[in-house]
């Protein structure tokens, strides 16, 4: 199927991009990697009046740590860059474990983390990781800049809270309170498939005590699910068979799976329990 006719703009600065967005309003779509947007346009699920390609705007292809220990990921930072990143391997284990599991090599070579978050697909792996890490999106427009927690950014299936005229210019992961550990476990029918179940786990610890726990689920609800009760059950505790079992049970309870060709709801809920218990029970595998 051919896409509907659209106008194409390739601004060379954010200010120029904001001008195009202001002119076209909600009829404009921003293109970074295009791995989600282009298929939607070709299938005519989306018919924007104008495509605003931001790939010519300098300064958006990066990922680095600030002096306070927080991590910034620019809007044009590709999945492949994150997959190969020494910084993620050494200091951000949950992200490092997730990056190689994003789609397939072709998608990872062009797609972006920020674009994936904006697409807000309930099967998106990065949204669960960012929920577990307490991440946020930094949106900018001609009016200024604002930070949006990922828990408030993804508001529904394929819906985000960007306002007309805004561009998500970067994602941010806050500095850990203590030592960061974590992982991302994904059950898929074949490499590159959507997750039957995905589980992101991120811990921040001082010695054996958990200062903060993050647990989020992919593929078992209409949105990525943050397991708040399981997180609260771990905060201030140490990992032992009892606390691990409680957290895994609460995470499974938070899941909202539906039976489909990938498995029954009961099976998916069991996988959530198993993955959370496995992740928490293997601290060595979660270390950076």
Image: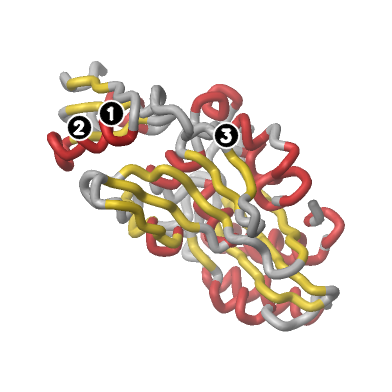
Closer to the N terminus: mark 1 or mark 3? 1
Q: Viewer-nearest of labels 1 and 2?
A: 2
Tell me, what colour scheme is on the image? secondary structure
| Residue in the picture at 66% in, 35% down | 83
Residue 20: give its label.
Answer: 2
Where residue 86 appears, x then y in whole percent?
A: 75, 38
Q: Which of label 1 and label 3 is nearer to you?
A: 1
Apparent side of residue 275 relative to residue 28 in the rendered image (left or right): right
Q: Identify the residue at horizontal 78%, vertical 46% (top origin).
A: 90
Q: Position of residue 118 (x, y in %)?
A: 39, 45
Mark on residue 117? none
Give the crowd class for mark 1: few <14, some 14-19, many >=20 residues within 10 Å.
many
User: Cβ–Cβ below 8 Å for labels 1 and 2?
Assistant: yes
- Residue under label 1, please give it: 52
Element on which disc 2 rests: helix
151 over 192 or under it: above or below: below
- As drawn, the residue found furthest toward the left would be 23
Is residue 271 at all visible to an observer of this figure?
no
For residue 59, above or below residue 161: above
The disc, 1 or 2, on the residue closer to the chain's N-terminal end is 2
- The tag on residue 79 is 3
> Label 1, label 3: how many angstroms apart (C-alpha)?
21 Å
Answer with mark 3 or mark 2, whichever residue precedes in sequence.
2
Name the residue nearer the viewer: 119 or 219. Answer: 119
Give the residue at x 47% y 65%: 256
Q: Which x, y percent locates residue 82?
A: 63, 37
């Amino acid at each position: 199927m051919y896409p509907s006719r659209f106008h194409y703009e390739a601004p060379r600065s954010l200010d120029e991009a904001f001008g195009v967005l202001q002119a076209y309003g909600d009829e404009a779509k921003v293109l970074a990697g295009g791995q989600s947007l282009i298929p939607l346009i070709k299938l005519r699920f989306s018919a924007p009046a104008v495509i605003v390609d931001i790939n010519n705007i300098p300064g958006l292809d990066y990922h680095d740590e600030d002096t306070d220990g927080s991590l910034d990921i620019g809007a044009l930072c590709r999945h492949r860059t994150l997959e190969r990143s020494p910084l993620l391997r050494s200091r951000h284990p949950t992200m490092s474990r997730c990056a190689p599991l994003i789609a397939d090599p072709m998608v990872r070579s062009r797609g972006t983390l920020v674009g994936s978050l904006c697409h807000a697909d309930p099967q998106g792996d990065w949204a669960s990781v960012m929920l577990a890490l307490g991440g946020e999106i930094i949106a900018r427009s001609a009016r200024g800049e604002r930070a949006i927690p990922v828990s408030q950014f993804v508001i529904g299936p394929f819906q985000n809270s960007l306002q007309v005229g805004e561009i998500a210019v970067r994602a941010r992961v806050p500095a850990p309170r203590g030592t960061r550990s974590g992982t991302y476990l994904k059950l898929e029918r074949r490499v590159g498939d959507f997750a039957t179940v995905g589980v992101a786990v991120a811990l921040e610890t001082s010695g054996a005590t958990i200062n903060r726990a993050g647990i989020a689920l992919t593929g078992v609800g209409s949105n990525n699910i943050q397991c708040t009760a399981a997180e609260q059950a771990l905060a201030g505790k140490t990992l032992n068979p009892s606390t691990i079992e409680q957290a895994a049970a609460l995470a499974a309870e938070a899941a909202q799976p539906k039976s489909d060709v990938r498995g029954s709801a009961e099976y998916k809920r069991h996988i959530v329990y198993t993955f959370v218990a496995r992740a928490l029970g293997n601290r060595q595998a979660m270390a950076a």
